[in-house]
């Protein structure tokens, strides 16, 4: 599907491109500048978490069983869309630690990113991918997707009891947390050596704001609050907590809006 859409859109001018995307996926995107999370939530329709779980499970089982190549947000693609900066970071970290990788994928669904990247990581001397998720995702993951490398946990405490991970990932996750910096305080206080973000929305100017995201009905009709972060403020938070910026990069994220800009960041503890 991805390749077909890419071919269809090649050579289009910006207005035609916008119309083509709207025709393909419907009207969706980001809107509003709300003073509180509750205010944004009141302007959202919410989502059916059970329906989302069923769709992700069905799609990812096809990937696991070799019937499909790649899944993201319950949508199947005919080729894997890698985040090469993320993969490079994971291999770089592994090379610094005797070809061993132990990470926490916070909000990692049923292991979508694990299945996306495992081909490049299976050769490592030791490789553990631990997903922290909501209860119904963890139960489904344990029943259908766990293997020697992929495990599921209800929270960071439960995960820490079993594995001493050096890396934590937030892949299109932190923006959907009501109080993101409270969670990040917990993360930095746990002493993770590396913290990696990808597909996170940022503004180059202006204060961080709360908006509403509307998802295409062709994926899963829903709307919910999210944060759009001021990039400099986000970076400064980690610097003030003893981390250095290894790199930041543009994410492979498609939207029909000019803002926000989706980026990834790689942080390393410096103290």
Image: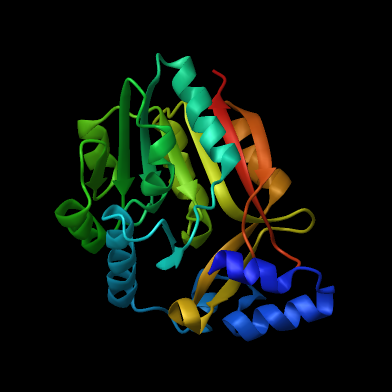
* Residue 256 appears in the rendering: no
Q: Position of residue 80 (x, y in %)?
A: 49, 52
Question: Total number of numbered labels?
Answer: 0
* Residue 98 appears in the rendering: yes
* Residue at the extreme left of the image, as rendered: 143
Q: Position of residue 26 (x, y in %)?
A: 59, 85
Left or right, residue 127 beside residue 144 = right
Q: Give the answer, above or below, for where 196 lies relative to 65.
A: above
Query: Closer to the camera, 175 or 220?
Result: 220
Q: Residue at x 32, y 20 (%)?
A: 125
Left or right, residue 190 beside residue 96 = left
* Residue at the extreme top of the image, as rendered: 98
Judging from the image, the colouring scheme is rainbow
Q: Position of residue 212 (x, y in %)?
A: 58, 75
Q: Give the answer, above or below, for where 10 lies relative to 41.
A: above
- Which quarter of the figure has residue 66? bottom left
Q: Residue at x 44, y 47 (%)?
A: 183
Query: Closer to the camera, 45 or 59?
Result: 59
Query: Closer to the camera, 14 or 248?
Result: 14
Q: Position of residue 269 (x, y in %)?
A: 53, 24
Left or right, residue 114 beside residue 221 = left
Q: Give the answer, above or below, for where 23 lies relative to 228.
A: below
Q: Residue at x 42, y 48 (%)?
A: 116
Q: Residue at x 40, y 32 (%)?
A: 121
């Amino acid at each position: 599907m991805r390749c077909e859409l890419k071919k269809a859109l090649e050579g289009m001018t910006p207005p035609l491109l916008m119309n083509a995307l709207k025709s393909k996926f419907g009207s969706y995107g980001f809107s509003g500048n709300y003073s509180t999370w509750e205010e944004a939530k009141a302007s959202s329709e919410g989502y059916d978490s059970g329906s989302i779980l069923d769709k992700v499970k069905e799609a990812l089982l096809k990937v696991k069983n070799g019937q499909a190549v790649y899944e993201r947000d319950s949508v199947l693609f005919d080729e894997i869309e890698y985040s090469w900066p993320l993969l490079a970071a994971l291999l770089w970290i592994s090379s610094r630690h005797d070809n061993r990788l132990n990470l926490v994928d916070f909000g990692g669904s049923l292991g979508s990113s694990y299945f996306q990247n495992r081909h490049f990581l299976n050769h490592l001397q030791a490789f553990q991918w631990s997903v922290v998720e909501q209860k119904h995702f963890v139960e489904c993951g344990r029943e259908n997707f766990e293997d020697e490398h992929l495990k599921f946990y209800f929270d960071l405490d439960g995960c820490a009891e079993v594995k001493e991970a050096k890396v934590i990932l937030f892949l299109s996750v932190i923006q959907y947390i009501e109080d993101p910096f409270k969670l990040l305080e917990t993360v930095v206080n746990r002493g993770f050596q590396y913290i990696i973000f990808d597909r996170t929305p940022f503004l180059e100017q202006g204060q961080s704001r709360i908006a509403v995201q509307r998802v295409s009905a062709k994926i899963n009709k829903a709307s919910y609050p999210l944060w759009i972060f001021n990039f400099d403020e986000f970076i400064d938070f980690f610097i003030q907590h003893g981390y250095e910026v290894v790199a930041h990069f543009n994410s492979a994220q498609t939207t029909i809006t000019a803002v926000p800009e989706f980026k990834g960041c790689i942080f390393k503890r410096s103290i």
